[in-house]
Amino acid sequence: MSRTVLITGATRGLGRAIALAFAKSGYQVALNYAHNEANAREALAEVEQHAANGGSGEIFKADALSEAGVNQLISDVSAHFGQAPDTLVINATPPQYEKALEDYTDEDLASMHAAFILGPHYLTKAALPSMQANKFGRIIHITSEVFELGLPRFSAYVAAKGGQLGYVRSTASELAPHGITVNALAPGWIPVERHDEVPQATKDNYLATIPAGRWGTPQDIAHTALFFAHEDSGFVTGQSISVNGGKTN
């Protein structure tokens, strides 16, 4: 039976690497994007070039952080592939605020809550009926090491990521009887194209704190996502794996 994975924020950075890995593993891959169609088509071309074992791909424009956008996205993916996604990789993210705590507004905190709790909730709810009917589902949240680190000046982001982890744990318990697993993958800082302007000294300082002594790669994240998605991983649920070279342990 073919498997269909929906990856939000799938056309750049970590999401693009995850999409490529799933296509190589024979999945029908739905690559979600919100804005840049040219970039999305480049990602799709790469997925199609490297797809193997019956894998394929298609791009889907949608706001994966809104309920209406998510409902339309699930409908479009189901219509295109002839089946609803049985695997979700919840990866889409807006820019994160970096502010002193006294400078945060209610709107700042609400926007992070919307991105990392409401968005995942909408996706889970929309994909759930078909997963329950099939007695199979894999829901993979891309979280962050920042919750374990308590990163300063990112309090709204860190708090929302903590809330997302709580959502993972609660839904994992609730959905386990239906054959649905819910897990979190917490990357360390893995520089991708959006970090091109970060000063080299900042990167060097972070690298010095990684016990493994090297940068993580997008492929490190993709391989862990595939582990969570595998049919043989059905007894692993409610877990969070840090993929950061031992920075948190």
Image (spheres, helix red, strand yellow):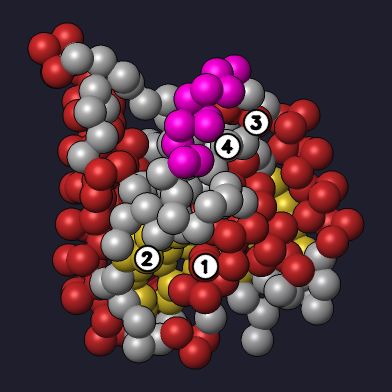
User: Can residue 193 be seen in the rendering of this structure?
Assistant: yes
Callout 2–callout 1 Cβ contact below 8 Å: yes
Q: Could you tell me how far apart the alpha carbons at marks 1 and 3 are, in whole angstroms?
A: 21 Å
Depth check: 80 or 104 in front? 104
Identify which amino acid the numbered label 3 is placed on: Glu
Depth check: 134 or 44 in front? 44
Q: Could you tell me how far apart the alpha carbons at marks 2 and 1 are, in whole angstroms?
A: 8 Å
Identify which amino acid the numbered label 4 is placed on: Pro
Magenta extent: 197-208
Magenta stretch: includes residue 199: yes
Q: Secondary structure at mark 2?
A: strand
Check disc 1 and report the residue beneath it: 224
Comes first in the chain, label 2 or label 1: 1
Considering every residue shown, the one lying at the far left of the view is 102
Check disc 3 and report the residue beneath it: 193
Q: Secondary structure at mark 1?
A: helix
Which of the numbered marks, if any, corresponds to residue 191? 4
Q: Could you tell me how far apart the alpha carbons at marks 1 and 4 are, in whole angstroms?
A: 18 Å
Check disc 2 and report the residue beneath it: 241
**Image position of 134 with respect to 75: above or below:** below
Instruction: Say whether residue 216 is left or right of residue 28.
Output: left
Point 50% across, 40% down: residue: 207
Instruction: Say whether residue 1 is left or right of residue 144.
Output: right
- Neighbor class of circle 1 (other Cα within 10 Å; few <14, some 14-19, many 20+) is some
Q: Secondary structure at mark 3?
A: helix
Q: Quadrant of the C terminus?
A: bottom left
Depth check: 108 or 4 in front? 108
